[in-house]
Amino acid sequence: MTLTDVKKDARAEAFARRKVAFAARAAGDSDRLKAVLAGHADKVLAGYMPMRTEIDCLPAMAAHQGPVGVPVILAASTPLKFRTWNADAVMVAGAFGALIPEAGDWVEPDVLIVPLLAFDRRGYRLGYGGGFYDRTLEGLRARKSVTAIGFAFAAQEVDEVPIEPTDQVLDLIVTEKEVFRPGF
């Protein structure tokens, strides 16, 4: 079985687990994320527009005291760019159906909330397979210090995410139940 096959199977399993967690979600799932972000109020934050069964980071993004951006996919196999966002922004459909601000300045995040399908205690995440966040984190980290925060339901944790050399490690993982710094 190839790594591609292993990741494909892991994604199918992770989607199913996340769907169950999403059905059981509760008000306040983003409270821990809000608390973490309070320590980064002077930083440029980038989050994501939740799709399907992703945990909702919008309440934490809306509460952030500094600039906030959301990802925009400009082309396949490229890093993400981030356009400013606020709760009143006019949103339009972007690539892959994710909502993006219709207009706004581009920002470069200091703190990046990263969506995922699965994560492990080492700080690795299983994404959707496009490599957008790995390329983005690699580029940002080459230029500056950036904090990558994986945000997920606790049920999305697995023993070990299948990885390859291009996979970027998360600095912090926040779930509705806990906050932890990955260890190796």
Image (cartoon, rainbow, N blue to C red):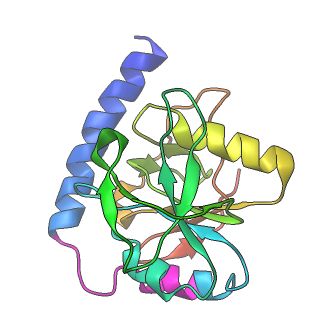
User: Is residue 150 found inside the magenta-colored segment of the image?
Assistant: no
Quarter-of-image position of residue 29? bottom left
Task: Assign the N terminus to one quadrant of the image.
Answer: top left
Q: Residue at x 64, y 37 (%)?
A: 135
Q: Is residue 17 left or right of residue 157?
A: left
Q: Is residue 169 visible?
A: yes
Q: Is residue 161 left or right of residue 98?
A: right
Q: Nearer the viewer, residue 9 or 76?
A: 76
- Residue 128 drawn at (x, y percent): 39, 37
The magenta segment: 24-36
Q: Residue at x 67, y 86 (%)?
A: 41
- Is 44 situated above or below 53? below
- Residue placed farthest to the front in the image? 103
Q: Is residue 168 visible?
A: no
- Residue 35 drawn at (x, y percent): 55, 88
- Residue 173 drawn at (x, y percent): 55, 64
Quarter-of-image position of residue 129? top left
